[in-house]
Image (cartoon, rainbow, N blue to C red):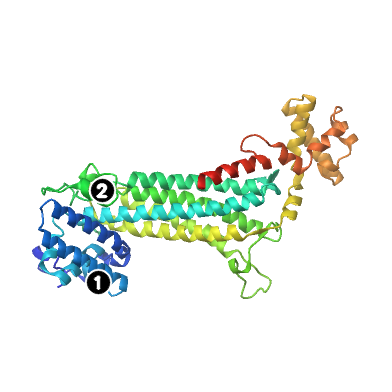
């Protein structure tokens, strides 16, 4: 008992270790809704094509509804003996409605069944993720708008580089997340084809209508090659590749929040409810959520490696290896879901210390490039020469313990005789930012223009 679905040619039941390595119901029960949806579409198509009789189809559909009610009520018996979600549903259907249940699997194999279920699940996961990422973009946009003109240091090599605005910095992530949404959207469009009807691998001798099931399941059409339909998992790889890139973006922002929250930087704080304390050090306020967003990236990227390794050497068509496709995809989406949620909450709640950030924007001779650019513009120096003069000015300022704007005019004139007091206008962080009016630059007008465009795109 318990192997009745394929037991005909067997005289012994599986060894305990066989069952232990083979069982997947603990994982793939998450596909129950998709499995029922796929079975309903298949059943209706079989009846419409006259492959099964209408009363049998009615009985099957009624049974599937009853199963759904059991699962929703938490009373459905998920049994290891029936291996996976597909056989658990069919076994239960047989208990509920008897003989007609045996007709549901006509012109179908678990190979096209699981491929169908998994595509449906992944499609819905893409839709959820796109929604969530759009929510994160909105949170970033709101904060960027509030701080479009607030200065902060821009870094390269994590060394002070040139002043930017906090709004500009946040908008960089709006762009990244926008491309992530694009990747999920593209992957979703490519995966939206129907494997159902490929049957085991070669197609079916029954007069099935794969266009009808495609339509019923919201697919754009049937997959065009039955071997490919049951063998392909690049759709799953593609979405976890998109998830990996996205998790990498979240991780970079998480890392910045961790850095910004150190007392040494002191750029932002997070409220109590998004931080944790220490069990020993009473003064601590730790950015655990940001750290975990950073760490979840490991799971997501690991999932991509796991699944590509499972798939890379498999001969066509189905091999049982492919049962190992679901844990990485589920894990990647679970991790990403938490990461996006936590990041959205942090972005919405973080409190920047704008005075401190503005002060820091002037540290480290951050307007040196502005001095060099002034020498090029006003004195027509070649940029390389201007770079050299400015370097000497920085050296002199360092020696005198002042910043560039604090360097007396005669000191500057020692380095380049043509310099006038006019130069001081470009040496403040405000002036530096305001001057960067090139498209996509950090001037507050530019930042506000990009914010307006994104608000329009997201509305
Ligand atoms: N549980 C299986 C999986 O997820 C379903 C397909 C089984 N097919 C087979 N030929 N054994 O891959």
Q: Which residue is mark 1?
A: 79
**Image coords of residue 191 (percent x, y):** 33, 47
- Badge 1 crowding class, 10 Å Cα cut-off, few under 14, some 14 to 19, many 20 or more, is some
Q: Is residue 182 visible?
A: yes
Left or right for 337, reference 167: left
**Frontmost residue, 249 versus 105:** 105
**Frontmost residue, 124 versus 274:** 124
Q: Earlier in the sequence, mark 2 or mark 1?
A: 1
Q: Which residue is mark 2?
A: 215
Look at the numbered disc 2 and give the secondary structure of its residue. helix
**Image coords of residue 82 (percent x, y):** 21, 68
Q: Is residue 11 above or below residue 50?
A: below
Left or right for 207, reference 329: left
**Image coords of residue 91 (percent x, y):** 18, 68
Residue 80 sits in which quadrant? bottom left
Residue at the outermost right position: 410
Task: Please tell me which residue is depicted at 22% across the width and 45% down the height of the picture.
Answer: 211
- Badge 2 crowding class, 10 Å Cα cut-off, few under 14, some 14 to 19, many 20 or more, is some
Looking at the rendering, in which quadrant would you find the N terminus?
Answer: bottom left
């Amino acid at each position: 008992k318990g192997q009745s679905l394929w037991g005909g040619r067997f005289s012994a039941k599986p060894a305990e270790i066989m069952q232990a390595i083979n069982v997947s119901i603990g994982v793939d029960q998450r596909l129950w809704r998709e499995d029922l949806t796929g079975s309903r579409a298949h059943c209706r198509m079989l009846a419409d094509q006259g492959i099964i009789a209408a009363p049998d189809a009615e009985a099957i559909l009624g049974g599937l509804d009853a199963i759904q009610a059991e699962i929703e009520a938490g009373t459905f018996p998920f049994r290891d003996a029936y291996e996976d979600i597909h056989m658990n549903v069919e076994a239960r259907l047989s208990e509920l409605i008897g003989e007609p249940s045996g007709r549901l699997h006509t012109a179908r194999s678990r190979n096209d069944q699981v491929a169908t279920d998994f595509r449906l699940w992944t499609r819905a996961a893409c839709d959820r993720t796109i929604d969530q990422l759009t929510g994160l973009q909105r949170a970033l946009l709101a904060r960027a708008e509030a701080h479009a003109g607030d200065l902060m240091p821009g870094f390269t090599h994590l060394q002070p580089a040139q002043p930017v605005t906090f709004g500009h910095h946040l908008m960089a992530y709006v762009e990244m997340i926008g491309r992530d949404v694009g990747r999920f959207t593209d992957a979703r469009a490519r995966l939206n084809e129907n494997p159902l009807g490929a049957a085991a691998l070669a197609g079916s001798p029954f007069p099935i209508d794969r266009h009808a099931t495609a339509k019923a399941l919201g697919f754009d059409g049937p997959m065009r090659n039955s071997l490919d339909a049951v063998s392909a998992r690049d759709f799953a790889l593609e979405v976890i590749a998109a998830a990996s890139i996205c998790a990498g973006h979240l991780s970079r922002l998480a890392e910045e929040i961790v850095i910004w929250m150190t007392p040494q930087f002191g750029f932002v704080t997070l409220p109590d409810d998004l931080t944790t304390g220490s069990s020993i050090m009473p003064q601590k306020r730790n950015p655990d959520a940001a750290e975990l967003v950073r760490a979840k990236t490991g799971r997501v990227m690991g999932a991509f490696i796991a699944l590509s390794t499972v798939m890379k050497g498999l001969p066509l068509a189905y091999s049982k290896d492919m049962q190992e496709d679901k844990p990485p995809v589920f894990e990647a989406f679970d991790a990403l879901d938490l990461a996006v949620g936590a990041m959205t909450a942090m972005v919405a709640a973080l409190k920047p210390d704008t005075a401190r950030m503005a002060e820091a924007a002037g540290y480290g001779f951050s307007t040196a490039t502005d001095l060099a650019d002034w020498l090029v513009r006003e004195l027509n120096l070649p940029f390389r020469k201007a770079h050299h003069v400015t370097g000497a000015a920085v050296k002199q300022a360092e020696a005198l313990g002042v910043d560039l704007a604090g360097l007396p005019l005669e000191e500057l004139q020692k380095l380049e005789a043509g310099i006038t007091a006019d130069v001081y206008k470009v040496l403040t962080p405000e002036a530096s930012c305001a001057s960067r009016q090139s498209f996509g630059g950090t001037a507050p007008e530019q930042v506000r223009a990009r914010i307006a465009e994104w608000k329009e795109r997201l509305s």
